[in-house]
Image (cartoon, rainbow, N blue to C red):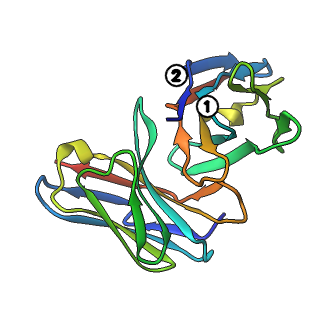
């Protein structure tokens, strides 16, 4: 069975500092990987995804994530965070060819002015 | 935003009463999902549908039933609500074209007293 581990439940970081949100998954077969963001009192929005090809994927608002097959990781990074990045971030995995997503427990990113 | 609406957005009910939550989409997507979100658990799949009248159980289906009589509507029913079903419920939709990518509704906050 697939599982997703987000080790950090809360990450406080100062504005303009870099941040890394960690995600590890377990699966014996090929997977697709996703990061979703949830702003307060809203639904989830897709931030970025890895399906195949380049292991480094980027979002339009400066986040990037790198698929590392040997470490079974898909960590999310941003070199300089803004106040508006304060949100909860969820890592998710699905099997290739399947449509069901398995979510991690989430990491609450708080950007401090 | 993807055309997904959920109703009601908030509901307070008493233990033992039946509750039905509605998800409506205007995207004509084949796949629809119901998740619950609880602190420390992330999102967990309750039921999903892969077509009209085609549904299947997810990770936490006990105490819930679903129905899909039209492409655009996916109903989640709690036959006899319990306090453990107090949660935020999210509907999501997905298509064959966008592999495993899901779009989420705004959520329904349900409180069972």
Badge number at residue B85: none
In the rendered image, residue B44, in percent from the top left (x then y), is placed at: 43, 43
Tags 2 and 1 on a common chain: yes
Q: Nearer the viewer, residue B96 or B25?
A: B96
Q: Residue at x 41, y 29 (%)?
A: B40
* Residue B104 occupies quadrant: bottom right
- Residue wearing tag 2: A9
Badge number at residue A28: 1
| Left or right of B59, for residue B97 | right
| Residue density around tag 2, few if under 14, some if 14–19, many if 20 or more, within 10 Å | some
Callout 2 touching callout 1 (CB < 8 Å) = no
Q: Is residue B111 above or below residue A92?
A: below
Mark nearer the viewer, 2 or 1: 1
Q: Can you see residue A37?
A: no
In the rendered image, residue A63, in percent from the top left (x then y), is placed at: 79, 34
Query: Given the image, what chain letter belongs to the residue carrying mark 1?
Result: A
In the rendered image, residue A87, in percent from the top left (x then y), is placed at: 60, 35
Q: Nearer the viewer, residue B83 or A112?
A: B83
Element at badge 1?
Answer: loop
| Left or right of B49, for residue A68 | right
Q: Residue at x 51, y 57 (%)?
A: B106
Element at badge 2?
Answer: loop
Residue furthest front in the image? A28
The answer to which of marks 2 and 1 sits earlier in the sequence is 2
Q: Residue at x 46, y 78 (%)?
A: B52
Quarter of the figure with the C terminus of chain A: top right
Q: Residue at x 43, y 71 (%)?
A: B54
């Amino acid at each position: 069975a697939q599982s997703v581990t987000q080790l950090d439940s809360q990450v406080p970081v100062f504005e303009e500092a870099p941040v890394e949100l960690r995600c590890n998954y377990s699966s014996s077969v090929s997977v697709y990987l996703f990061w979703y963001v949830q702003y307060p009192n809203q639904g989830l929005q897709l931030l970025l995804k890895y399906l195949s090809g380049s292991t480094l994927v980027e979002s339009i608002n400066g986040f990037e994530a790198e698929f590392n097959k040997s470490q079974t990781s898909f960590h999310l990074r941003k070199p300089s965070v803004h106040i508006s990045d304060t949100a909860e971030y969820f890592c998710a995995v699905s099997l290739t060819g399947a449509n069901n997503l398995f979510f991690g427990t989430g990491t609450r990113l708080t950007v401090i002015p | 935003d993807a055309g997904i609406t959920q109703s009601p957005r908030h509901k307070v009910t008493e233990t033992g009463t039946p509750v039905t939550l509605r998800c409506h989409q205007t995207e004509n997507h084949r796949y629809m999902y119901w998740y619950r979100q609880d602190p420390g658990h992330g999102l967990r799949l309750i039921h999903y549908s892969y077509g009209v009248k085609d549904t299947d159980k997810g990770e936490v289906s006990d105490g819930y039933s679903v129905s899909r009589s039209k492409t655009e509507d996916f109903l989640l029913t709690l036959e006899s609500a319990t306090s453990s079903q107090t949660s935020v419920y999210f509907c999501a939709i997905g298509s064959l074209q966008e592999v495993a990518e899901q779009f989420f509704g705004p959520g329904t906050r349900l409180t069972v007293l």
